[in-house]
Amino acid sequence: MLKVKNLCASVADVEDSDILKGVNIEVNPGEIHAIMGPNGSGKSTFSNVLMGRPDYEVTDGEINFNGEDIIELPADERSHKGMFLAFQYPVEIPGVRPWQFLKASLDAKSEYHGESKISVREFSKLFDEKVKSCGVNPELIKRSLNDGFSGGEKKRNEMLQLEILRPQLAILDETDSGLDVDALRIVADGVNSMRSPDRSFVIVTHYQRLLNYIKPDIVHILVDGKIVKTGNADLALDVEKNGYKDFQ
Amino acid sequence: MSNNSGKKMKIYQEMFTGIINNETCNVLNVIRKNAWSTFSAKGFPTSRKKNELWKYTNLNVIEKKSYELDYNAENLKINIDENELPKDKKWNNIIFINGKFSSTHSDSTFETGINFYNISDVRKNKKLSEKVAKIAKVSDHNFVALNSALFQDIAFIEVSSQITQPINVINIISNDSKQKIILPRIFIEVTDNLNIELIESYINFTNKSQLVIPVTEIKLNPKSSMNHFRIQEENENTFHIPTTRVSQESNSKFSSVSFATGASIGRNDILAELEDEGSESDLRGIYITHGSQQQDHEISTSHKSPNCISNQFYKGILSGKSHAVFSGKVIVERNAQKSVATQKDLNLMLSYGAEIDAKPSLEIYADDVECAHGATAGHVDKNSLFYLLSRGLGEIEAKSMLVRGFAEEMLDEFTHEELSNFVGNLINKKIPLVLAESDTIGTT
């Protein structure tokens, strides 16, 4: 599904700002990959580069999604093709109502694929159903996108978006940072309920604790812009015990 | 006074002569003469000579143009799509065209409790005419003086018992053939304990430059309240310089929200005077400018008695080389103890060429008060933009959604669905124009 080869990236328009220095991973349908690494190793850059954030420039390598090179595609097209990024810090956008925003997202995707748009009635039904199943406060979600939401509420809202947009590949960018145990469970429940043989996840995290709730198939250790070790779920437990010092 | 302005003053002098010769009401005659002598002495305000009120606004362009009064406005038959007006059949619709009351286009009857008079009624009744120009004083500034000297008609409204539907005064500017001076005038008084809604709109269907100078006087008696909605949709060649004066008795409440767009130079000048204890004033609005437009907000609240609450909250969306001024003033007089006042002006700068001059100010002479103020100018940041893009929205749609989102909280203040749809559509029409001239979105 996702093949990343020798991916090198730097901060756009800044010389000598290389962050990713040749990352290789391959994610197959249905797999959950965890990418762990110390602060400053390039984890967040990696998730943002996968989604096409214009702040970064890919200087070398390939990102192949379902057989297609997507490096030149803007973020909205990557989304249409089935990619999703859950943000470390979901942006607060006052005045933009989640209902309208998600309807517009689905409509844009339908238009891109030449499909008919979901009706208002059908979408409302889906929205209400997912608001309920994700445990999102229905009063809060009427108002604004993340504006005035607590950390946990923002993460619930990310999971709501994930469940409505139903991507093939979801990237979670340090989505567990700053979360208490209850909020961690929200994220984990979201991911676990979405697990399916044709959907994959890339979970970027500093700590092993999220992986207590979501069991990864493969764990990669990213240090200084490179994957230095790949293993199974036990590798995360080693990191928990010994930290990253053995890899640096 | 320059030669040019001397020549132009002659044109206004001729208008005044025409009006005063036909003024049959003694009370209005005195008001007009007094107003004319005030206006003719100084002419239009200038931005020179440390004139703080007009510091950022150059009115020379107005002086350079010639305008004429529309003497036949009441006979104008116009063909306008009702959908282009902020209107609902249920409301009490009072239509003025080019400053004159149109009985053809207005509702034939209004709800019980609304006493509506036009200028011919006011001329015949001293009790009515004596109320004119008491709240918006001729000495206030020269646009009030000019309107008071030349106004051709008035919406004089007394609300004497509780009504259920808004009073909707629509000022249509029509008839494209001439550059006109239009002087809409509203006086409205609300009896004790009544709660009413007033919609005041200015909808321009012409392309020519017009000079529109409205004066609105609002009198709120004890324990009465008014929700006031103001819509300014002029064309981009027009100058719209209105004055709204509100006199509030004890425990009255005035809430106003305005939407301003369109004009070449537009202004929204409100003074709410909290005369007696326990009154509240809540002034809000949104302005959207692009091209070389200028929109000023001269917003003042005067706390004259103890235990009053006031709020000023305005938002602006600026693009192109447009210019906006927010001059918010709260005055708390010495005896106005326990006053609570807040003041805020937030601006979304969509282009580097746009300019905002925000001057929130507090003049406090009492010692036991709670006051806060602030102003900001910011951009649509790249994080917000990327967030929407990552969810599949195209760049234009994402930017539109962010700009609209900024306006949304003010749109919510237009509490009638018809009104909020009307203003929402105006905002949607403006968004492509402001985005076309935008160069800041996502750059920071």
Image: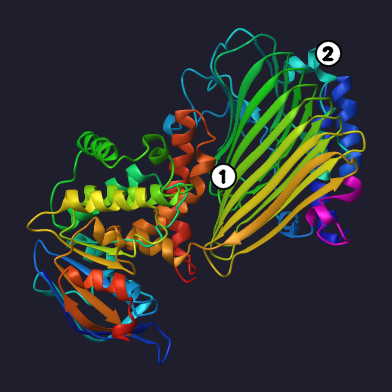
Is B190 placed left or right of B443 in the picture? right
Report the amino acid beneath label 1.
Ser
Mark 2 element type: helix
Residue B203's spot in the image, x, y percent?
A: 55, 38
- Residue extent of the magenta highlight: B40-54
Residue ID at (86%, 30%): B305
Query: Which numbered dot is residue B360?
Result: none
Is B284 placed left or right of B399 in the picture? right
Given residues B309 and B318, the one toward you in this image is B309
List the residue tagged with mark 1. B177
Judge depth for marks 1 and 2 and give the one in front: 2
Q: Residues within 10 Å of mark 1 (few under 14, many from 20)?
A: few
Mark 1 element type: loop
Q: Is residue A124 above or below residue B299?
A: above
For the stretch drawn in magenta, the main secondary structure is loop
Instruction: Check if residue B53 falls in the magenta segment.
Output: yes
List the residue tagged with mark 2. B127
Residue B173's spot in the image, x, y percent?
A: 58, 38
Distance from Cα at disc 1 to Cα at disc 2: 38 Å
Q: Residues within 10 Å of mark 2 (few under 14, many from 20)?
A: few
Given residues A59 and A152, the one toward you in this image is A152
Q: Chain of mark 1?
A: B
Instruction: Check if residue A97 falls in the magenta segment.
Output: no
Tags 1 and 2 both on a single chain: yes
Residue ID at (92%, 38%): B334
